[in-house]
Structure formats: structure tokens, C-alpha cells
Amino acid sequence: MTFDVDVAVVGAGPGGLGTVLNLLDADPGLRHGMLVVDPSGSWLHRWRWQMEAMGISHLRSPATHHPHPDPWQFRKWCMSRPSGLVMRDGYEMPATRAFQDFVDETIVEHDLSEAVTPDHVETVTQKPSGAVVRLANAGPITCRRVVLATASRRKRLGVAFRHFRDRRVVHAEDVDLPSLELSGRRVLVIGGALSAAHLVIGANDAGAEVTMAVRDRFRVRKFDVEPGWMGPKYLDGFNAETDRSVRRRIVSSARDGGTLPPWARRELAKLAQRGSLRVILKAPPTRAWIAENGVRVQLGEEDLEFDHVWLATGFETDLTEEPTLHDLLQTQDVPIHQGLPEVDHELRLPGTDIHLVGGLAALELGPAAANLHGLRRAGLRVAHSIVPNYEPVYTAHLH
Ligand SMILES: Cc1cc2nc3c(=O)[nH]c(=O)nc-3n(C[C@H](O)[C@H](O)[C@H](O)COP(=O)(O)OP(=O)(O)OC[C@H]3O[C@@H](n4cnc5c(N)ncnc54)[C@H](O)[C@@H]3O)c2cc1C
């Protein structure tokens, strides 16, 4: 069979990049048959934007989590850059700047600077001749394999804001702190996890009067999931479970509700103690309306007025929300468990040559599928599938 390209990678975030690096590690010859597409035309565009927009100075994940195929490469790189890793809460936290510089060097070293085609993939379908990618600005491209690394997800808005349309009420993902004039403004941040904490800290630094509404109470955890989910401790049991609906429940309960790392909890406590932050616990917003001078929000017994309301309420991952797959899902039978599809061990949608990388692969990779560790494991699995005799020289878990 002949293909226009060997492998098409849709999305040039850490997931797309990690997969490409693993594929080149497995078979350098793949370089000539690879197409990477992202509307930005560059690597990690969304990642960089979200870090800058929320003022994130350090990553939550440890130094071994990054797109390079050698897990130790970033730590080695940091040895000559003392500010690259900061010791906090008993582990080395990578500085966002260092992580980005390292990734930029990795891209140059692998001669990938010009590798991203600036376009938008409209559909990915499966034909007997192969997987077909249709771009906004080019005709259909038949591919031996497609890797979908778009991280599509639905913003969770909560009951009070589901139908609320006002420019002062935005999801955390759309807040751009550096562009806002916040001095003396009344800001409500809804949510009790790390994104909420970043926004509270950033708004407070900018001179805002900040209130934080937390659904229940703060829950503290170093990483986004228990470390056992990033190794054999919990993954062995997960892999032994054959019922995908049980796996779905496991994924939900391991990720249920957001958490804060200890350092962020301490920062919030300091702000609250100084009187710079009001925290309202166990009072999720039930109602919101436009008032004369702002947005009024019902929080428990009180209704309060704000100039900005930021919803740091997370996301839902749902295959049916992935726009590129709408056509495919009309014809292909894909069992879906509360948004998560069944994929094979190689992360392919059943009966297709389309691999999923990221949160959509959680029924195979477990609750950490969407973070940098999950993306690393996904990249390895895809590389093993496309280059079956791949023998990675680096040690890495392949659960
Ligand atoms: C604020 C924040 C902080 C985080 N911090 C950490 C952390 O410290 N450690 C950690 O392990 N994880 C972290 N994560 C989680 C995760 O690692 C990031 O979300 C990461 O960006 C996911 O990478 P990705 O490649 O899956 O998706 P993204 O980085 O979102 O990249 C997806 C790309 O796909 C492109 N795309 C989408 N649709 C199409 C299409 N139709 N055609 C072409 N291209 C398309 C997008 O333009 C985008 O560039 C964080 C997440 C957030 C939101």
C-alpha cells in the first residue's frame, strides 16, 4: 500500500513532541515521512501561553518528566544551571523557564525547528487505504498512522455559570494575567486546586482584592495524582483490571477534585493570614447575575459583587468533543466510558490506525495519562507500535 506520509502527528504540544522524539529515536529514517501539524506552526505554543498567562514560575511535576526520550537528560542539563531546579516540599521542581530552554535546545538538536506545519486538522478518518487527515488548507493526506495529540477537553463551568455570557466571567484557561489591570479590582477565583492558587497569587501580586471560593476544602498532594500512578505500585493493579468500565471508575476517583501541592497551600495560608485573601469554603456558587457595578455571585448565605470571576474548575475529557473525530465516530464503533474511549495496548482506536496521546488514552495508561509522565509513556507505546523492533536505550517504565 502507498501512503502520502508515514506518520502524521496532530498537535505540537509536549505530547506531540515527545512522540516525535521517540519515533526518531526508534527509527531516524521516519523523519522523511513525518507530518506534524499545529495551527501555531511551532512547538509547545499552548503550553508556553498557559504558563505565561497564569504566571507559573515552576512546574508541578518532577525533573524526569519532559518530552526527551532520556528521562535523566533534563536533570543533567540543569547541573550547569543552578536556577533550573528548586528544592521544594522535598523534591526538585523544574523552573518553567529552564524547562522551556531545555525543550528548545532539544528541538534544535533534533533539527525539528521547522518541522511544524502551520495548519488546522479538520478531520481524521479511517479508510481501507489508511488513516486520512484533512487539513484546512490542503487536500486529504493518506497516512500509515496518525497520532492525535490535541488535548481536546471541555471546560467545566459549574451550574451557576453554565449559561452565563459576560466578558468578566472566564474560565481559568482564558485568563491572561499580564494583560489585565487588576489594581484595586475585586476578583473571585472559583476552585481550590493549583490553577486557582496560581490565579489567586498572580491577582494578589497585581494589587487585586481577591476572594477564593472552594467547593469543599483544600486537599493537599504533591503531584496531580498519587506518585503510585506513575509506576508499578498502582499501575500493575490497573493493568490487571480487564473491565474498562471499572478502569473508568478508577481513573475518576484517582483524579476526583483538584489538589494543591504543599507549597501552594502555605502561600494561600500566608495571604489569608495577612488579610490579602478571603477564602470561602464549602460554598460553591449557586447563582450569578449582572449587577450595576459588577457580577454578583451567591456563595452560601452571602451574595457578593466582583469585577472579575475566574472559573478554575477544571476540564472534562470526552472523545465525542474531539472535533477532528466527529465524522469517524459516525461510522466507527468505539466503546466509550463516560467520555473515555477503549483503545488497544498501542493506544489505537479500535479498527483504525489512529493513536490517541494524552488524557483520552487514560483507560490504557491510567489516571496520569494527561500529564508529562503519561505523555512520555504514550510516546513510547506509539513508537513501539510503529517501529516494532524499537529497543529504547533509556530505561523507562512501560506499564
Ligand atoms: C496550567 C497548566 C499547568 C500544567 N503544568 C503541568 C506540570 O507542571 N507537569 C505536568 O506533568 N503536566 C502539567 N500540565 C498538564 C499537561 O502536561 C499540559 O496540559 C500539556 O500542555 C499537555 O500536553 P499535550 O501535548 O497533550 O497538549 P497541549 O499542550 O494542549 O497541545 C495540544 C496542541 O494541539 C493543537 N491542536 C488542537 N487541535 C488541533 C487540530 N485540530 N489540528 C492541529 N493542531 C491542533 C493545539 O494547538 C495545541 O498546540 C499542566 C496543564 C495546565 C493547563
Image (spheres, rainbow, N blue to C red):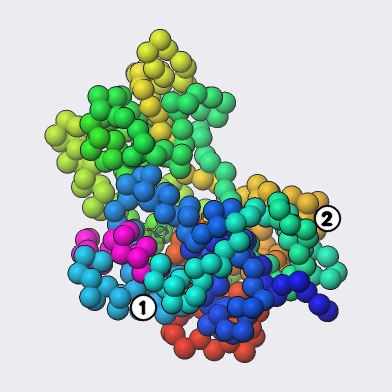
- In the rendered image, the quadrant that contains the N terminus is bottom right
Q: Which residue is mark 1?
A: 73
Q: Is residue 120 above or below residue 310?
A: below
**In the image, what residue occupies the spot 32% across and 47% down?**
55
Query: x, y percentage for residue 50?
Result: 42, 49
**Mark 1 vs mark 2, CA separation in Å:** 43 Å
Q: Are marks 1 and 2 in contact (CB under 8 Å)?
A: no
Amino acid carrying mark 1 in the image = Gln
Location of residue 141 (image quadrant):
bottom right
Q: In this view of the protein, which residue sits in the foreground, 67 or 239?
A: 67
Q: Which residues are magenta?
A: 85-103
Apparent side of residue 227 relative to residue 276 in the rendered image (left or right): right
Q: Is residue 327 above or below residue 79?
A: above
Query: Dot 2: what SS?
Result: helix
Residue 399 in view: no
Q: Which residue is mark 2?
A: 331
**In the image, what residue occupies the spot 36% across and 45% down?**
54
**In the image, what residue occupies the spot 40% across and 67% down?**
104
Query: x, y percentage for residue 310?
Result: 41, 33
Q: In this view of the protein, which residue sits in the foreground, 350 or 235?
A: 350
Residue 353 in view: yes
Amino acid carrying mark 2 in the image = Thr
Location of residue 217 (image quadrant):
top left
Apparent side of residue 396 relative to residue 72 in the rendered image (left or right): right
